[in-house]
Image (spheres, rainbow, N blue to C red):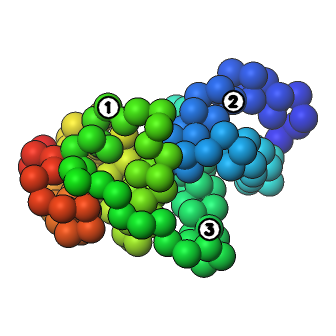
Amino acid sequence: MTNEALAKLYTQYGALVHRRCRTLLGSETDANDALQETFMRVQRYPPTDVAALLPWLYGVASRVCFDHLALRKRSQPTASRVLGRLKELMGAVTRDSAEEKLCLGSELARLDDTTREMALLHWLDGLTQEEVAQRTGYSRKTVGVKLKTAETMLRAAFGDGAVGGAS
């Protein structure tokens, strides 16, 4: 990928990718680092045969963020669990909930890559199970099973009475 093409991609999508990183990492500084790493990976491994660039960039950024969270988890003690309800994280999260986001990120990092991607597409991006199935290439039933697995694991970590079923 040429520097000009990368600059154009950054100009067009940089702010959106940065927002995704900030949402997942809960820190402006970490989001800046993740944004830079995302576009470094894009330059090293440019997209080939990608129909929609933004979802692809979100996938790259999400993997970078989970790498950062895994490193943070290994180098720092795990933040104490402060959530009473998972629904607050899946819905309207306030700016003051960086610790909650960190806890959620740590729990999401424990999921396998496919389940985590499906959970992010469904809960963060608001895609239906059918749309997630189309995006990932899995059946709608598989998506439902994986979302239910993720929901069960997150409920166990953050308490019951959280989100409704993985619809």
The 10 Å Cα crowd at callout 2, few under 14, some 14 to 19, many 20 or more, is some
Q: Say what amino acid the circle numbered 1 marks.
A: Ala
Quadrant assignment for the N terminus? top right
Give the percent coordinates (x, y) of residue 49.
Answer: 59, 42
First in residue order: circle 3 vs circle 1 = 3
Give the percent coordinates (x, y) of residue 18.
Answer: 64, 35
Question: Which residue is pictured at 88% across the width and 37% down the height?
Answer: 2
Q: Is residue 33 left or right of residue 124?
A: right
Tell me whether circle 2 and circle 1 mark residues in contact (CB < 8 Å).
no
Q: Say what amino acid the circle numbered 2 marks.
A: Gly
Q: For mark 2, what is the residue?
A: 14
The 10 Å Cα crowd at callout 3, few under 14, some 14 to 19, many 20 or more, is some
First in residue order: circle 2 vs circle 3 = 2
Q: CA separation, marks 3 and 1? A: 25 Å
The 10 Å Cα crowd at callout 1, few under 14, some 14 to 19, many 20 or more, is few
Question: Which residue is pictured at 48% across the width and 66% down the height?
Answer: 79
Indicate whether 108 appears above or below 28.
below
Give the quadrant of residue 83. Answer: bottom left
